[in-house]
Image (tube, rainbow, N blue to C red):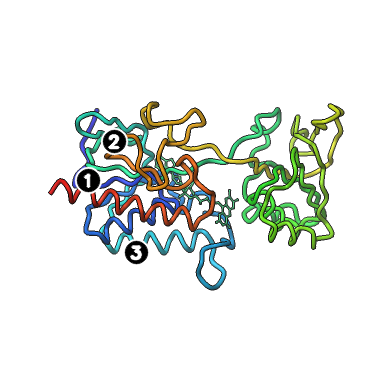
């Protein structure tokens, strides 16, 4: 049965990552009735488990969760309503219809899509079986299980390198499995080079996560030669990029890679819908940009509503 949600007629923000929280807070500050939808209940999105977020532009060390909870508190104080259900569908008819997983529908006048992205899976045998039993996507949460043991990080970007740096503090060795050259920021690469327990498996991709009851190692393939080898590790941390969370939108709004077609001003191809942060095409990939885009989207939505009187 479809039941209406109350008092949600103005701006709906989808996603409680840093883009969405910034959008919701700013929209409410502009005097708009804002509802924030967060599907996982874990605010902060991709940085929710990051101990020290880099590039926030404020002094001191701040965890992703601390930043998110601060924004959430401020947003609630400004009157933002929070709904802890995933949005499963947005229809852009004459009236917008936004439906959550619990079967409720509301009709906001503007929608800010800030649903970000999820970490991409390796898609190899053993990955699903050992998720939570040796395969992890959070060094801060699970690194302690591998104290004094050998682990592997898969990937070459900022996320892979920063997670490897966390693991290198406690694990015996960290092997970076790299299919291509490292593309993380030089500051992170320098920190990695200063660690004497970090190794590299170059030109390599994972073919299988091996083990009986827990992870025993990885089967790797050299992408140049095709030769296969085994790497003995107890923990595997894949960070091979992200995939946008936007399947709830009409396909016409999306690119082939699943990102929302929206320009840097956050305007999409529908004048009532804006996209901010990691879900948007052309997003640059850092939290400062995600937050700035959230604010820009809130301003654009408020302007649209003001124009309607
Ligand atoms: C391990 C790691 C470390 C990083 N460290 C840094 C760093 O130190 N500095 C930096 O600048 N960048 C860092 N990044 C990049 C940064 O995390 C992202 O660029 C930024 O967080 C994107 O924010 P976002 O709000 O757009 O999306 P996300 O963080 O992905 O947030 C999206 C939110 O939307 C919610 N959601 C998704 N679908 C739905 C739905 N259907 N309904 C309701 N809610 C939904 C999700 O649960 C999530 O909370 C890191 C990334 C990773 C993976």
The disc placed on residue 98 is 2
Callout 3: SS:
helix
The disc placed on residue 74 is 3
* Other residues around mark 1 within 10 Å, as few (<14) / some (14–19) / many (≥20): some
Q: CA distance from mark 1 to mark 2?
A: 10 Å
Q: CA distance from mark 2 to mark 3?
A: 25 Å
* Other residues around mark 2 within 10 Å, as few (<14) / some (14–19) / many (≥20): many
Q: Is residue 297 left or right of residue 1?
A: right
Q: Image height check: is 237 above or below 210?
A: below
The disc placed on residue 8 is 1
Q: CA distance from mark 3 to mark 1?
A: 19 Å
Pick whichever of labels 2 and 3 is earlier in the sequence. Answer: 3
Does any atom of ligand 1 lie closer than 8 Å to the CB of label 1?
no
Pick whichever of labels 1 and 2 is earlier in the sequence. Answer: 1
Q: Position of residue 281 (x, y in %)?
A: 47, 39
Q: What residue is rendered at 73% in x and 47% in y? A: 182
Q: Is residue 161 left or right of residue 63?
A: right
Callout 2: SS:
strand
Q: Position of residue 233 (x, y in %)?
A: 80, 43
Q: What residue is rendered at 67% in x and 51% in y? A: 184
Pick whichever of labels 3 and 1 is earlier in the sequence. Answer: 1
**Residue in the foreground of this view, choosing between 36 and 113:** 113
Q: Is residue 20 left or right of residue 148?
A: left
**Residue in the foreground of this view, choosing between 223 and 261:** 261
């Amino acid at each position: 049965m479809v039941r209406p949600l109350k008092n949600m007629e103005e701006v709906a923000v989808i996603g409680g990552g840093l883009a969405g929280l910034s959008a919701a807070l700013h929209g409410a500050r502009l005097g708009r009735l804002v509802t924030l939808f967060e599907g996982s209940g874990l605010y902060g999105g991709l940085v929710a488990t990051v101990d020290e977020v880099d590039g926030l532009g404020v002094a001191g060390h701040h965890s992703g969760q601390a930043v998110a909870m601060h924004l959430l508190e401020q947003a609630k104080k400004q009157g933002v309503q929070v709904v802890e259900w995933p949005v499963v569908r947005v229809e852009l008819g004459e009236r917008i219809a936004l439906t959550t997983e619990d079967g409720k529908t509301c009709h906001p006048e503007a929608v800010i899509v800030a649903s970000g992205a999820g970490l991409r899976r390796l898609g190899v045998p053993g990955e699903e079986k050992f998720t939570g039993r040796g395969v992890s996507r959070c060094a801060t949460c699970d690194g302690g299980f591998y104290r004094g043991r050998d682990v592997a990080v898969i990937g070459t970007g900022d996320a892979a390198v920063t997670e490897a740096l966390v693991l290198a503090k406690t694990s015996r060795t960290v092997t970076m499995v790299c299919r291509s050259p490292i593309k993380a920021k030089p500051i992170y690469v320098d920190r990695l080079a200063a660690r004497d327990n970090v190794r590299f498996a170059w030109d390599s991709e994972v073919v299988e996560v091996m083990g009986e009851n827990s992870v025993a190692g990885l089967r790797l393939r050299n992408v140049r030669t095709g030769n296969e080898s085994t790497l003995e590790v107890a923990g595997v941390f894949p960070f091979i990029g992200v995939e946008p969370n936007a399947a709830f939108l009409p396909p016409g709004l999306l690119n082939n890679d699943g990102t929302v077609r929206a320009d840097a001003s956050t305007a999409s191809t529908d004048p009532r819908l804006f996209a901010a942060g990691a879900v948007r095409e052309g997003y640059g990939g850092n939290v400062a940009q995600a937050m700035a885009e959230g604010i820009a989207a809130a301003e654009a939505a408020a302007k649209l509503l003001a124009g309607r009187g």
